[in-house]
Amino acid sequence: MAQETGEIKTMTPRQRVLAALRREPVDRTPVCNPTSVATVELMDLVGAHFPAANRDPEKMALLAQTGHTELGFDTIMPVFSIIQESSALGCKMQWEGKDNWPTVKMAEPIWSEPQDIVIPPDLLKHRDTQCVLEAIKILRKRFGDDVCIIGKTMGPWSLAYHTIGVEKFLLMSLDDPDKTRRVLDKLKKVTIDFGMAQIEAGADALTLPDHATGDLVSGDYYDRYLKEMHIEFVSDIPIPLILHICGRTVDRMDYIAQTGMAAFHYDSKNGPGESMAEVKGRIALVGNINNPETLYSKGPDSVQEEVWKNLDAGVPLVGPECAIPLQTAIENLKQIPLAVKQWHKEKAGRT
């Protein structure tokens, strides 16, 4: 069963999320979106559409805050994509329209070898990193200390996909571990510097996506290449970090739980019960409401069923498993906090 909350005084959304990330008692389970809950419907509602909402700080903040003001989540996450740093590094971009995320043209990589990697000294002054920093400042000023603002800084494994290419980098990781580590070691500066800048801007926590996903690499790869680096990130970045890796990842959850990360944002391909058993209370879990089937294709009853499954397993923070499909219905997203509150109400009635 989920953690007992007892007679804890009512918390603000920010207090609730940060307490859960510290694995401390909360008044109720927080609803958290470490990635994106932006939808076309929300874009239309506030007049902040892609691609402008990925490049204009005011539009980014306006769209991001709907996660709290319209959906009722305890968090606001203004970084809707995974490309801000890669754009600033010089990757070629496809900005798309309002109904699709911007992407990196990974068929046109900018680097090939570790010695090619040069981090621009003005990385944090680029339009697309500045957009995030300014949006966080806007949101912090607008919401004060009431809501938990979560930033995002991409991990070096993900950045290597964007700058070197997925296939080339994965072959490198198989054939040349030393070269792979040199790539990661050079790219980690981006992760740390952008993360620290977001802290200065006002972020309470950071999502750290590092896409060593279950369908591409094994848990042993995580242990070999990323565990020690993630421990270093925890040491260097002084606010809670929420690691995000898609796919079936139970085979690396024990390693992840050893890093000191505050939380792991986990995929619906992993059961709540087995995941909680694997992390053994050493790290909080966030998730794992299914996107393509439940949130996009089904209705509120199915959403509630998945929310309650997480709560029954004791998952400390509940939310979608990843960035949601942009055509997701608002009513399904609103059902997540409603289901959390109803579960706690019924639980209180049983005790």
Image (cartoon, helix red, strand yellow):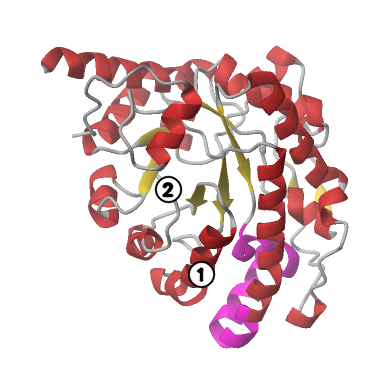
Query: Range of the magenta residues?
Result: 155-181
In the structure shown, which secondary structural element does the residue marked by tag 2 occupy?
A: strand
Question: Looking at the rendered structure, which numbered label has been put on residue 263?
Answer: 2
**Observer-nearest residue: 266 or 101?**
266
* Residue receiving disc 1: 226
Q: Which one is in front, 298 or 75? A: 75
Q: Vertically, is 241 above or below 31?
A: below
Residue 114 relative to residue 305: left or right: right
> For the residue marked with disc 1, what is the amino acid?
Leu
The N terminus: image quadrant? top left
User: Which comes sooner in the sequence, label 2 or label 1?
Assistant: 1
> In screen coordinates, is 337 left or right of 344?
right
Q: Hey, what amino acid is under mark 2?
A: Ala
Q: Position of residue 39 (x, y in %)?
A: 62, 25
Magenta segment, prevailing SS (helix, strand or loop): helix
Tell me the distance, in whole angstroms, between the alpha carbons under discs 2 and 1: 16 Å
The quarter of the picture where residue 337 lies is top left
Residue positioned 62% across, 60% down in the render: 158
Q: Residue at x 25, y 37 (%)?
A: 314
Residue 178 falls within the magenta-colored stretch: yes
Image point (59%, 74%), residue name: 170
Q: Nearer the viewer, residue 291 or 129?
A: 129
Residue 278 pos. (x, y %): 26, 56
